[in-house]
Amino acid sequence: MSTPPDDPTPRSLGQLVSDLSEQGARLVRAEIDLAKAEVSAKAQEIGIGVGLLAAAGFLAVSAFAVGLAAAVLGLSTVVAPWLAALIVMVALLVIAGILVAVGVNRLKKGQPPTPELATKSIQADVDAVTKGLHR
């Protein structure tokens, strides 16, 4: 930080307070501008990352569809093509049904989403304080 030039006239308290206020405002604006630039850069990186993940997800779903087609084609060398497609479809429906059953079961375990242990702990604390006050 540079020292102010030697001014032969002393500055009044009002001028000093005014300068301090002005410099403080400039500093706050500069910090806000820096924060905006930083958030903007990070948001751009997040946007690029999300876009790349979406592209990867699309390619993964496409690869899964190609894999299913390959399963149907491979199975069609043993049975009729319509039967191969039907077998793959039924297998997928069975897997989907199992996933639904497990998912519903997990949802029921989480209902209602209240912090039961924390509630009990707080109630115990309140009871202890209440008992301590009545002694």
Image (tube, grey):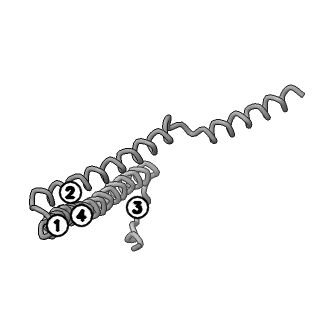
Mark 3 or mark 1: which comes first in sequence? 3
Mark 4 or mark 1: which comes first in sequence? 4
Report the residue marked by disc 4.
53
Circle 1 sits in a helix, a strand or a loop, which is it? helix
The relative height of residue 1 versus residue 85 in the rendered view (above or below) is: below
What amino acid type should be assigned to the residue bearing mark 3?
Answer: Thr
Q: Residue at x 50, y 34 (%)?
A: 112
**Mark 2 and mark 4 residues within 8 Å of each other at the beta carbon:** no
Q: Is residue 55 visible?
A: no
Q: Position of residue 98 (x, y in %)?
A: 36, 50
Mark 1 or mark 2: which comes first in sequence? 1
**Mark 3 and mark 4 residues within 8 Å of each other at the beta carbon:** no
Q: Residue at x 36, y 50 (%)?
A: 99
Dot 1: few (<14), some (14–19), or many (≥20) neighbours within 10 Å?
some
What amino acid type should be assigned to the residue bearing mark 1?
Answer: Leu
Report the residue marked by disc 1.
75
Mark 3 or mark 2: which comes first in sequence? 3
Viewer-nearest residue: 112 or 67 = 67
Quote the CA–CA distance across marks 3 and 2: 96 Å
